[in-house]
Amino acid sequence: MDEDLSQLSTVKMFVLDMDGTIYLGNRLFPFTKRFLEQVKASGRDFCFFTNNSSKNREAYLQKLSSMGISIPGEKMLISNGVILEWLQKNRPGESCYVVGTPALLEDFRKAGISLQEDNPDYVVLGFDTTLTYEKLSKACTFIRRGKTCYGVNPDLNCPVEEGFIPDCGSIYALVKASTGVSCEFFGKPSRHTLEYMLQKTGCKPEEMAVVGDRLYTDIAVACNTSVTSILVLSGETTSEMLEKSEIKPDLVLEDLSQLGGLLEQHPLDSL
């Protein structure tokens, strides 16, 4: 390994992706718990951030708990929260049509955003594992009528134990092919998400590292910033994909077990 590892000494917070990074589907990687212990032992901290908008925070907290990882709610960040905070600030009092799961719709209700089936002010596309043709048709109709379209997360695929399943980005590709209209995304790698991460963790950019298995989301969110990006090859990205990509991480590791070992070699700077 020939990367410059000195920047690890300024990192206080690891923002960890989930699918493909700490687990795959419903299988927790054997090294995950040990890594979390190593982070704590090194005087650093961690939180989780997932782009997967098919579930809400409560579902992820429950899933982690079932895997033996118990964390307070504020350590579980999700793309749903990014778009909801932005909509509350920038489109207050307006209604939306959401292509999403019941969990995503419930997040919108809890945020006080009105859900409208007939004449919404805007359309939101999520990772909808309950997708129907009727939902797609209605969304496209509203968009053709001039309603703004937003996407929760741009991921094309979601990694599962059997391989991959279509994610929000693929649903958006269908909608764009039908309407010709592009949308703004709010999950990784958007600057909306980076600002959200920094705000929720209270970190300066140089004190935060984003860790994940996808170049175009996990790694791209930190591009051209002082945030450290760490790619793990335990999920979607292969060495061949990395070689061909214009998006380059600061560090490339096989998995979190390698990162845990490096933390002991690069202790946190005392400020």
Image (spheres, rainbow, N blue to C red):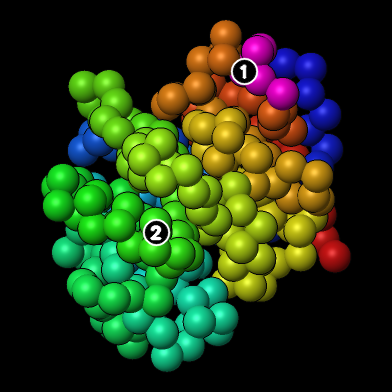
Q: Main secondary structure of the magenta part?
A: helix
Relative to 232, 119 lies left or right: left
Foreground of the two, 58 or 92: 92
| Secondary structure found at label 2 | helix
Left or right of residue 118, residue 259 in this image: right
Per the rendered image, the range of residues in magenta is 242-246
The quadrant of the rendering that contains the N terminus is: top right
* SS under mark 1: helix
Residue found 45% across the figure and 64% down from its top: 146
- According to the picture, the residue beneath numbered tag 1 turns out to be 242
Q: Is residue 102 above or below residue 218?
A: below
Residue 13: x and y, percent? Answer: 63, 57
Name the image quarter holding residue 101: bottom left
User: Of callouts 2 and 1, which one flags the residue occurring earlier in the amino acid sequence?
Assistant: 2
Q: Position of residue 80 (x, y in %)?
A: 40, 64
Which of 197 and 156 lies nearest the eye of the viewer?
156
Residue 67 drawn above or below residue 56: above
* Disc 1 crowd, CA 10 A, few/some/many (<14, 14-19, 20+): some
The residue lying toward the viewer, choosing from 120 and 191, is: 120
Which corner quadrant of the image does residue 191 belong to? bottom right
Is residue 137 depicted above or below 248 in this figure? below
Q: Quadrant of the C terminus?
A: bottom right
Where residue 143 is drawn, which disc sits there? 2
Residue found at x 30% / y 33%:
166
Q: Is residue 199 magenta?
A: no
Residue sticking out furthest to the top: 240
Residue lying at 23% horizontally and 51% vertically, measured from the top left? 137
